[in-house]
Amino acid sequence: MVPKVLISDELSDAAVQIFRDRGIEVDFQPKLGKDKEKLAEIIGNYDGLAIRSATKVTAALLEKATNLKVVGRAGIGVDNVDKEAASKKGVIVMNTPFGNMITTAEHAIAMMFAVARQIPEASASTHAGKWEKSKFMGVELTAKTLGVIGAGNIGGIVCDRAKGLKMKVIAYDPFLSEEKAEKMGVEKVELEELLRRADFITLHVPLTDSTRNILSRENLAKTKPGVRIINCARGGLVDEEALAEMLKSGHVAGAAFDVFSVEPAETNPLFNLPNVVCTPHLGASTSEAQENVALQVAEQMANYLLDGAVENALNMPSMTADEARVMGPWVKLAEYLGAFIGQMTDEPITAINVTYDGTASTMNLRALECAVIAGIMSRVNPDVNMVSAPVIAKERGIQLSTTTQDKSGVFDGYIKITVVTDKRERSIAGTCFSDGKPRFIQIKGINVDAEVGRHMLYTTNKDVPGIIGKLGTLLGENKVNLANFTLGRAAAGGEAIAIAYLDEALDAKVVSELEATGLFQQVKPLEFNIA
Ligand SMILES: NC(=O)C1=CN([C@@H]2O[C@H](COP(=O)(O)OP(=O)(O)OC[C@H]3O[C@@H](n4cnc5c(N)ncnc54)[C@H](O)[C@@H]3O)[C@@H](O)[C@H]2O)C=CC1
Ligand SMILES: O=C(O)C(=O)COP(=O)(O)O
């Protein structure tokens, strides 16, 4: 089936072209992001949704997005996407972290100049024929201290440009190392010190629980008198009411805001105050940046929908198309191993350990781990996938651990998973042969060579003559056709396991009859989702 993508915000035509060139059906409805009812009505038809900041991907919208696999944000900030809800629904959320960073940094610098020299007001006054030369006395940037809150990609470029302007740059970013700060030629400081020393403050942090209201009334009061504040990051980082009051009192000399706590901003405490420069979220609005993010998001979404490659996802480990191809059988194996043990385990799982041996240990382990968890969780929730499974496991407080080791046996590599419950530990191992077919190679420590079948019956018994005959007879009496059969045992007379491959799912009645014979310790019908 040809995947379908909806573009619900203003995106460069380049994105539409890429989707078409890649053989993806695309609907370009750039106004839809502002019409949430209409969007909710049709979202169920799409595998992918490409957005900017106008579309709000809420839990309610995701509920309706029954086919959605990926949300692609043509830009950086994803605070308009409920990532937790998306993860739970198994929807990948990806952004384009670099495509508009230069453009946004340049906008911040432009805003700093604009507020230092009151350019918008001076321009409006000149257009009005007033020639108010003495009214617009500005300040120089040279030798002033710029306080950068958040020195990541955009903040880093702002630091670099500001140094070019001969400013003294200080940065507050708890994740910025001293070495990196030194390399960037900036002084790393705490927030309090930044507030106290900066002549200009510019914000470049994402909007998160830790950054919301970072320039609160209390923090604004700690700033240097005459400070000018620039926000080209996100509305909600600054207390706009408090800032408006401080602008009026003269403590803050000016502000330049591109983003607002409510957008589109029709009213705002900062509007119509002298020396407040406002732009309507234009940070990323250059033709270059829009071309970059549109191309990138379309390529990333197409790669995922067509080849399973994952790039710049916020809720899934990265995987190249080549990796996805090479690892395909191993990802399947990981999922089948998880599904086997998940179906065997009725009591709550407290911990999962995954051992990667030989070739398996050289692969993208995060992706394999997600597949293992998805397999295990699929018994509880059939809609679970590699994106949602780790979230569900975390919610349930399941401890995850991994072990890697060099090739230790006859196989070039294998994956072994052990799950721990309050009552017991269970383990299973499997490998992929060169035919690309996943095989179970060890169950409960007993060696087997078992392919994966859609409908399987797993039994354990004491290794004594006649039991397998009885199993066959009972299945035959119930008109259950056997497609194949595999046995394994620890030692003669010890524990033995049998795996029967059936043509259809086993009736609960047959399971009860098998249990009633008293010959088996365990009788478990197993179902596998084989594409
Ligand atoms: N106005 C616009 O049109 C645009 C706005 N943006 C906004 O700019 C933000 C920053 O973008 P990037 O630099 O690309 O992100 P980034 O992830 O490269 O940098 C963010 C930095 O903030 C730091 N940080 C996180 N929590 C912090 C905290 N509590 N205190 C101080 N620093 C903290 C991080 O360590 C990181 O270095 C985006 O999240 C987005 O909201 C991005 C593009 C365009
Ligand atoms: O990339 C970002 O984070 C932005 O804020 C840009 O927003 P936009 O795509 O212009 O609506």
Image (tube, rainbow, N blue to C red):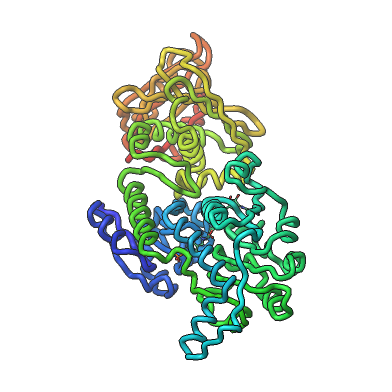
Q: Quadrant of residue 35?
A: bottom left
Q: Position of residue 490 (x, y in %)?
A: 50, 13
Q: Residue 298: x, y in percent?
A: 33, 55
Question: Please, is residue 357 above or below residue 363 in the view?
Answer: above
User: Is residue 201 shown left or right of residue 506?
Assistant: right
Report the side of 9 relative to 523 (left or right).
left
Q: Residue at x 49, y 64 (%)?
A: 107
Q: Residue furthest front?
A: 134
Query: Ligand 1, what quadrant?
Result: bottom right
Image vertical order of residue 87 relative to residue 236, above or below: above
- The answer to whether any part of residue 477 appears in the image is no
Q: Residue furthest bottom?
A: 129
Q: Quadrant of residue 24?
A: bottom left
Between residue 259 and residue 312, name the one nearer to us.
Answer: 259
Closer-to-camera residue (516/50): 50
- Residue 47: x and y, percent? 35, 56
Q: Is residue 176 above or below residue 80?
A: above
Q: Nearer the viewer, residue 381 or 278?
A: 278
Quadrant housing the C terminus: top left
Q: Residue at x 45, y 33 (%)?
A: 364
Q: Is residue 211 visible?
A: yes
x and y percentages locating residue 428 in the rendered image: 50, 26
